[in-house]
Image (cartoon, coloured by chain):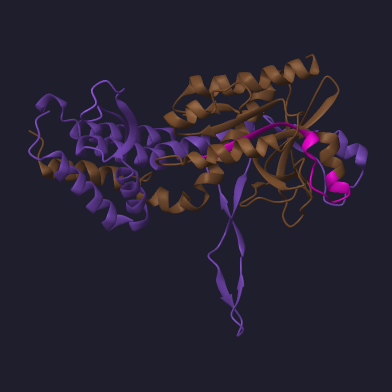
């Protein structure tokens, strides 16, 4: 594919678009891009040709072409990997049984050998506890962390496939190799 | 020729997709915990590989819904109906937990993102509220979801943690969706925790290695 833009222009556009939509995500992607990469450098000490070359590692910035790929990898982690984690978890939970223990049951024997309800093959409801932002409570300004939960819902395989295709399409737009 | 306009459209398509910005906003607070939960799920799969059905439990009763901790907590905490799994192989009982604190050999408490422990000790710690001793730990994993640049210090910290968990630990590993060349080297020596980089559903091969390793250790331990 020929491009009517430079890698730097493409990177600037991606970051600008991210910034417009979600500043927190833009910060994450900028951090990924700005992290640079480690390279091994070899240096011959000046004036002493008999001495061994000095070798050292240093961090260098990515070229814009590399930075674009790094940015896409970061977006893939949020847009594709995260939904896949949830679906994988739900798949693995489906094959497990639920225990039939009621809150007031304190029988050690029952706890040691839990009695399962036959629930294999049935989708389980899953939640992850989360904490709201620290809130001010009352006149004294005490802080409180109010626990809330986030349900983990299965995500359509078709949607994941579409989003992977969207990422692949962008990789094509960011591939400048043939123009080098 | 691809124009800036074409590129703009392709970026919009990605960000405006239901799994784009909206999904990120919905999930961002639990992304790292979702990765731990995913690893917990792989442990369940490893148990099933041994033809054993794991049983999902909650500290206060039937886990419906099954709740993962949002922050490290004590195994006996009944603040909410936190979930865990139990399974038995050849008369030996085990539990799988996420985000539970253990008492190290030095008496310092350590959080393990995901672990397999002896059920007898877990029951005891719930009956007489206490942190489980390091000797009760069978396997433990550090789980790190990152979108870029894994910090090296995470590896060093986990090696220190495992060192404080005594000699009963059969399996330990550092899991991440990313890879890191320096951390790969750091975990290479034989007595270090195993490295499970790029452990995601996008790499079924890496998932299989992880699952088979757990199944193998449990099989050997129990004579299954």
Q: Quadrant of the C terminus of chain B?
A: top right
Q: Is residue B205 above or below residue A109?
A: above
The furthest residue to the bottom: A139
Identify the residue at horizontal 77%, vertical 54% (top origin): B78
User: What is the magenta range?
Assistant: B125-144
Q: Position of residue B111 (x, y in %)?
A: 67, 45
Q: Name the tint of chain B in the rendering.
A: brown
User: Would residue B188 be found to the left or right of residue A7 on screen?
Assistant: right
- Residue A22 visible? The answer is yes
Q: Quadrant of the N terminus of chain B?
A: top left
Q: Name the tint of chain A in the rendering.
A: purple
Q: Position of residue A29 (x, y in %)?
A: 33, 47
The residue nearer to you, when weighing B170 against A19, is: B170
Magenta-colored stretch includes residue B126: yes
Q: Position of residue A114 (x, y in %)?
A: 83, 35
The residue nearer to you, when weighing B20 against B214, is: B214
- Residue A115 visible? The answer is no
């Amino acid at each position: 594919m020929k491009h009517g833009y430079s890698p730097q222009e493409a990177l600037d556009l991606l970051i600008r678009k991210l910034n417009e939509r979600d500043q927190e995500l833009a910060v994450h992607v900028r951090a990924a891009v700005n992290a640079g990469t480690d390279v091994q450098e070899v240096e011959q000490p000046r004036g002493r040709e008999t001495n061994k070359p000095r070798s050292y590692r240093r961090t260098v910035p990515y070229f814009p072409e590399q930075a674009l790929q790094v940015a896409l990898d970061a977006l893939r982690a949020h847009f594709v990997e995260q939904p896949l984690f949830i679906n994988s978890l739900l798949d693995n939970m489906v094959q497990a049984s639920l225990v039939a223990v009621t809150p007031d049951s304190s029988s050690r024997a029952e706890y040691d050998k839990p009695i399962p309800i036959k629930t294999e093959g049935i989708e389980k409801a899953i939640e992850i506890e989360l904490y709201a932002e620290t809130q001010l409570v009352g006149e004294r300004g005490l802080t409180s962390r109010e626990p809330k939960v986030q349900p983990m819902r299965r995500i359509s395989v078709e949607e994941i496939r579409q989003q992977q295709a969207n990422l692949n399409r962008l990789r094509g737009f960011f591939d400048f190799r043939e123009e080098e | 020729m691809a124009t800036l306009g074409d590129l703009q459209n392709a970026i919009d398509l990605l960000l405006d997709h239901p799994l784009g910005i909206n999904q990120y906003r919905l999930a961002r607070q639990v992304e790292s915990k979702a990765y731990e939960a995913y690893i917990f799920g792989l442990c369940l799969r490893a148990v099933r590989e041994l033809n054993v059905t794991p049983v999902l439990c909650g500290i206060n009763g039937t886990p419906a819904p099954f709740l993962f901790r949002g922050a490290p907590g004590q195994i006996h905490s009944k603040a909410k109906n936190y979930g865990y799994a139990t399974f038995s192989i050849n008369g030996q009982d085990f539990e799988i937990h996420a985000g539970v604190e253990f008492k190290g050999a030095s008496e310092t408490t350590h959080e393990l993102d995901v672990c397999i422990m002896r059920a007898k000790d877990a029951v005891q710690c719930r009956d007489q509220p206490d942190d489980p001793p390091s000797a009760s730990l069978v396997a433990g994993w550090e789980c790190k979801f990152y979108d870029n640049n894994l910090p090296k210090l995470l590896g060093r910290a986990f090696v220190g943690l495992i060192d404080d968990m005594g000699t009963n630990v059969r399996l330990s590993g550092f899991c991440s969706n990313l890879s890191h060349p320096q951390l790969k080297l750091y975990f290479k020596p034989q007595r270090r925790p195993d490295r499970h980089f790029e452990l995601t559903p996008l790499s079924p091969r890496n998932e299989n290695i992880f699952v088979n390793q757990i199944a193998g250790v449990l099989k050997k331990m129990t004579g299954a």
